[in-house]
Amino acid sequence: MKPAVHRWLSRRWAFNTSNAYWRTLPMLSMGKFLAAAFITWCAVGFAIDLLLVNYQPLGRGFFWPIYFGTLGTALFAARMRRTGLVPVFLVIMGAGLWLAVQISFHASASPDLEAMHRRVVFDAIGILVGTTVGYRLLIDFIRAEGFATVRIQTELALAHGMQATLVPTLSLQVDRFEVYGKSLPSTEMGGDLIDVVERDGTLLAYVADISGHGLAAGQLMGMLKTAVRVSLQFRQEPVAVMESADRVLPAVKEANMYATLALLYFDGLSEAEYSLAGHPPILHYRAPTGDVARLALEQFPLGLMPGGRYSSQRVSYSPRDLFLMISDGISEVPNETDEEFGLDRLEQLLRKNAVQPLPQLWELIMGEVKRHGVQQDDQTLLLLRVRA
């Protein structure tokens, strides 16, 4: 019932408060806007009192303005903050309106024409002052916050475009391999990176996780992707690619930023080369035996301690083998009891569904992750299958 009510209210609410600007705006900064909302709703209360001019005024005519001003402002604040109290305030407003009207209907106003005239003038002045002052405060709020709003929305649009450019959905089929991967950022600009580079009969696939989010993480993502691709153009081996990135990143990043990485490299031989830098293990489903192996190496993240040395190992593979690379936003997602999704569940899903088409397998795994718990970090999953 609650989701249906929320959708109904969302379609009928007067203005859209679902964007990140309203949800993140500090309450202090909303003071002028909420003041404008209160005074405008007070004008509505004066109008209600005017409609009930033939009945006894409540609270000397101030009941309806204060009632609507308070609840109307609370309704705006709850809707902006998505607190889930909107239906509660609507019920309170409706119940209070019904009760107050019933009380008014049982208390007729005095037949004194002069008193009725004073009440009409009182309510008319209240409506005029409420609409004028409320409008003025709203204009002041727009002028004061307008530039900040434009800047925020521009940054969000830029981040979204950067995310789509740097981390598109990967879907690739070549003679010997099939690859499918996608990243789900937790904000407009995430910090996860996936890429696949095919060149001269070789194929390199990797997943990287940049510390942090936002434009700074997006810029470092672009630099890391460029560094890897440039290194491959000079025919560097995977270990040399990682060491080059480790040397380059410190000069172009903030001091507290770094990147974890897991990569697979296929050079036409019967073995694949893999390396990791502070990243979750690569899962290798072996089709002939049906078991899953974890490919792991304990090494420092890139850019954390410049000048480090990296190593790699090789693993044999067979037709229909499947490799899975993730970011920790998948393995570490907690459920209601703070139990992480973990690698064991991923291994079970691989064993049971290894023959599924890669896009369907991706959806199946991410569906299980979503059912396990709410996304708290960027979630990236890259699947690579050796074709028969």
Image (tube, grey):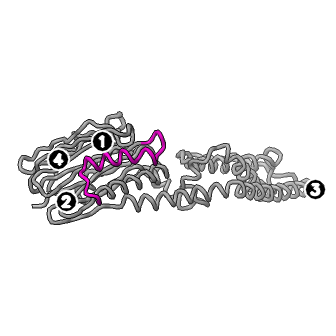
* SS assignment for the magenta stretch, majority: helix
What's the distance in space between the residues labelled 4 and 1, CA to CA?
18 Å
- Asked whether the viewer can see residue 4, the reply is yes
Where does the image place residue 233, in percent across and percent down from the top left? 29, 60
What's the distance in space between the residues labelled 3 and 4, CA to CA?
90 Å
Q: What stretch of residues is rendered in magenta?
A: 233-257
Which numbered dot is residue 284? 4
Residue where numbered disc 1 is placed: 277
Where does the image place residue 303, in percent across and percent down from the top left? 39, 42
Where does the image place residue 125, in percent across and percent down from the top left? 86, 57
Q: Amino acid at mark 3?
A: Glu
Relative to residue 211, is residue 319 depicted above or below? below
Which numbered disc, 2 or 4, marks the residue that appears first in the sequence?
2
Task: Tell us which disc is closer to us: 2 or 4.
Answer: 2
What's the distance in space between the residues labelled 2 and 3, CA to CA?
95 Å
Q: Amino acid at mark 4?
A: His
Task: Tell us which disc is closer to us: 3 or 4.
Answer: 4
Where does the image place residue 108, in percent across and percent down from the top left? 80, 51
What's the distance in space between the residues labelled 2 and 1, CA to CA?
21 Å
Which numbered disc, 3 or 4, marks the residue that appears first in the sequence?
3
Which residue is painted at 62% across and 56% down in the image? 149
At mark 4, the secondary structure is: strand
